[in-house]
Amino acid sequence: MKNKINKLTMALIAASLVGCGSAQNNGQVDTLSTAIAPGAPGDKPYWAYSGKTGIGTSYEAYVDGQYSDKAQTGPVSKVWFSLAQGMITETMFGLIHQAQLKEMQFVITGTDAKGQAFSVAESNSSDFEISVDYLHKDAQGRPLSLAYKVLSKDKLGRFELEKHIFTDPDGQSLFVRTHINTGLDTPVQAYVSANPYINNNGVNDFAKVTKQGLVAYEGDNYLTLQVAGGFEEASVGFTGQSDNLAALMNTQQLEHTYTSTGEESGNVSLLGKLGDVKGSAHFDIVLSFGKSQNESAEQASKTLSKGYQAVLDAYNGKGDAIGWEDYLASLKPMSRLAQYSADQGKLLYTSAMVLKAQEDKSYAGALIASLSNPWGDTVPASEGSTGYKAVWVRDFYQVAMAFMAMGDTQTAKTAFKYLEKVQVTDSTPGNKGDTGWFLQKTHVDGELEWVGVQLDQTAMPIMLAWKLHQANVLNDEELSYWYTKMLKPAADFLVHGGKAKILWNDTQITPPATQQERWEEQNGYSPSTTAAVIAGLVTASDIAKRSGDMAAAARYLEVAQQYDKQVEALMFTSEGVLKEQAQSQATDGQYFFRIGQDSNPNSDSKINSNNGREGMNKKAIIDGGFLELVRYGVRSADAPSILATLPEYEDESMIDNLRVKYSFTFEGHSGTYPGYRRYGNDGYGEDEVTGTNYAQGGKNTAGQRGRVWPFFTGERGHFEIASAAQNNQLSADKVQQIKQTYVKGMELFANEGMMLPEQVWDNVGVNPRGYKFGQGTNSATPLAWTHAEYVKLIRSLADKQVWDHYPIVEQKLK
C-alpha cells in the first residue's frame, strides 16, 4: 500500500511541476499535494572549501559615513557570495558572517555518443577543466567589477557549463546566468541543487516546494531559489538521505520528489530541473533572501523581472548606475600605482575591490579578515561560526592603511570610527576588569568572541589615528575628540597595563609583555608587538600634545623610550641555538627570536606548546617580527640587531621544522621568489604526515605544519625599500628589482581569480589534494591582510618610502 501511495503522490506532483520542456519553460511550481521527505536530519553538515577563487557583493555608497537606502546607489544590498572549485559556495545575507547557503551546484545528465548514460555534478570538480575570469574588464585586462565568469568544461567533451555570477545591487538576490553548450546528438538535462545553511548553520532548516519556487527557512530567515520560467521538476529533501542527488547520479532521474521536509528540521537540500538542452541554452537563476517567505520570493521575482543585462549593468556601474567601476574611478592614485605592479595593475584593481567587499553593510567600517571559514570542508556546521568573517583589529589596521594607500580615505575614516565598538569599556558585556584595550576578535556587530589581550591591537588604533590626521582625514577637532574618547584609554593601557577580566580571561597585563602576540598563541616579549606598542605610544604622545594634554604627552613618550631601550635586552640573543637545533649554516648565534617569556634573552626557557607542536627553546624559534621594528621607525634598516638577524631569517639550510624561508618557482616564469612561514615550529596548517586538514576532527596533531604566508613576501619587500631609501640607493634599477622580486612574487601567489591566500603549499609533507608548489591551500582565501600588504607594497614602491612608516617614531627615539 505504501508504494502505491508514493506512486500516486509522485504522479500528482509531476503533473503540477512539469512545464513545456524547453530551456525557458513557462511552468510554475505548485503544491497540489504534499509528500514529506524522509531521512531527517540528514547528513552531518560541514562548511565549504575555503580556498575561494572569487568573492563578490555590490558596491554601495555611504551617506554621512553610513550605509543607507537613501544613497545614490539605492537600496543597500546585503548579499555576499564566494566561489570555490568551480561552484558557488558560502553565500551570506544580513550581516557579513551570516551564511545562508553552503553551496549551489549544477548537475548535467544525458546519453553520450556511445549511448552510455551519464550524470556529472559540479561537486566532482575532477571531472572538469575549470577557469575563472571577470565579466567586466578594461583594455589592460584589469577587473572593473566583482562579476565572474566561471567556465567548467567536461573533460570527456560532452558539454560546457558557463556561469555568470553577481548580485542585484538594488535587491537581496544572487543572480546566476548559466549557459550550457553540448555537441551531443541527444539532449542533456540540466538541474540545479542548493544546500542551504540558513542562519549560519546547517542543522535547523526546513524546506518546501511552493508556487514561487524552492524555499528554505529557519525562524524568520528565508531563502528562495527561482529560475526564469519555472522549474520542470522540483523536490526538497534531507542532504544525503532524500535529496535525490544519489539517484540523479546513478539513474539520471529523480527517484522520488518531495514537496516538504515536514515538521522536522535538519540539513536540507533543494533540487530543480531546469530543462532539456539540445545544442545550447541558458537559464537565469536567482537565489533571494528575506525575513519572510513573501519578502524572499518578491526579491527573486523583482530581480528576474529586471533581467540579466539590467542587473549586471547596475552592478558594474554602467551609465547612470553607480557600481564597482565608479568605486575604482574614485581611487585617484590607482593609475599611478598600477605602473609599479608587474601585471599592469590586475591584482591591484582586484585587491581594491576585494578589500571593500569585505566590509559589513549594517555596521559601516567593520572590516573582516576573510570571507571564508579556514579548512571549512572538515569543520562542522552544526553551530553558527564566523570563521574569519570577523573583526581582528590587527588585520583591520592593515586594511585601513591599504584604503589610505589606494586613495579611499572615506572608508579608512569610517573604519577608524567603527573601532570604538570593539574597545573594552565599563559597558562591555561581562567586563569586570580594566578598560582601554581592544578585543581580540568580535562579530561585526561587536559581539564578543575571543577576549585575549594583544597589545599590538591596542596600539594600532592610535597609530591609525595619527596617520589619518597627518593626511588631513581627521581634523584637529576630530583628533582631540577621539583622543579623549578612545585613544587616551588605549595609550594608558599601554603604559600601565591592567587586569583583563572578561569571560574566560582573568590575567594581569604588564606591558611591554603581551598576553598574546600577533599569532595569538604565546605570551611574553615579542619584537613585532613591542614595535607597535612603542609606535603607538610615540604617536599617542604627539596626539596628546595636540590635544593639550601635556602631562600625558610626556608620560607616553617617556614610557616609549623606556620600552625602546629594552628591545634587544629582552628579545635579542647572543647565545643562539640555531646551529645545533636547526642545522643552520648561516647563524652566528646573534638574532631576534620570535618571543620570550622571561627577561633573559640568553636563557634556555621553553615557550608554550601550541597547535599540536611541543614547546621548544625560545632561541630555536625565529620569525619576521623584527622587521616591524624597521617598518614603524623603532629601528633603522641598518641597525646592528636587524642586520644580525637577516642571515638566520633568510637561511634555507635549516631543517624544515625550524626553517622560515622558502624560495618558489612558478611555471612559465623565470627566477625564484621568496616566501616565508610565520615562524619555526609552526603547527597552524595541514598535517605533513597524514595530509589531513588543520585540527581535522576537532583535534590538533603533532604533524600539523604552518606553511608559507604570502604577505611576508610583502613585509620583506618593505624592508628592501626601507633599506635602499635609507642609503639613497632606491634607483630605477633597484625599484625594478623589488618590483620583479617581491611585487611579482605576491602576484604569482594569487590564484586564477586573483585571490591572495593566507597560506601556500611549500612542498613539505603529504599532499593529498595535489597542491602545486606555491598554490594557496585550504586555510583562508582571500585573506584581507595579504591583499592589504600587496596594496601597501605597491604604494611604498611608488612613493619610494614605506607607506606605514612613522617618521615621528624615528625622531623621538634618537
Image: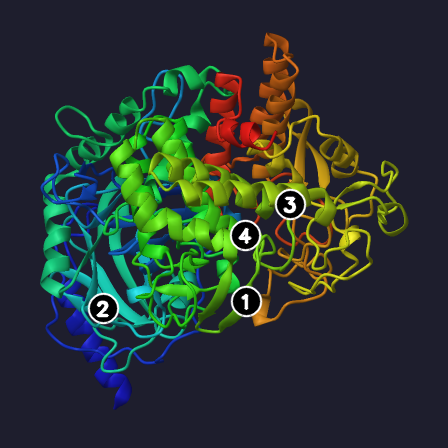
Residue 359: in sight, yes or no?
no
Question: Which residue position holds label 4?
Answer: 779
Decide: few, some or many residues near mark 2? Use Cα within 10 Å; few <14, some 14-19, many ≥20.
many
Query: In the rendered structure, which disc, 1 or 3, sits on the residue that comes first in sequence?
Result: 1
Mark 1 or 2, nearer chain start: 2
Residue sitting at the far bottom: 1
Residue 611 image point, x, y percent: 64, 63
Cα–Cα span, label 4 and label 1: 33 Å
Q: Nearer the viewer, mark 1 or mark 3?
A: 1
Seen from the viewer's position, the closer of residues 729 and 403 is: 729
Three-letter code for the amino acid on which mark 3 is drawn: Pro
| Residue at image mark 2 | 217
Q: Secondary structure at mark 1?
A: strand
Residue 741 position, x and y percent, is: 63, 23
Question: Upstream in the sequence, badge 2 or badge 3?
Answer: 2
The reply to whether dot 3 and dot 4 touch (C-beta < 8 Å) is no
Residue located beneath label 3 in the image: 527
The image shows residue 200 at horizontal and vertical percentages of: 33, 64
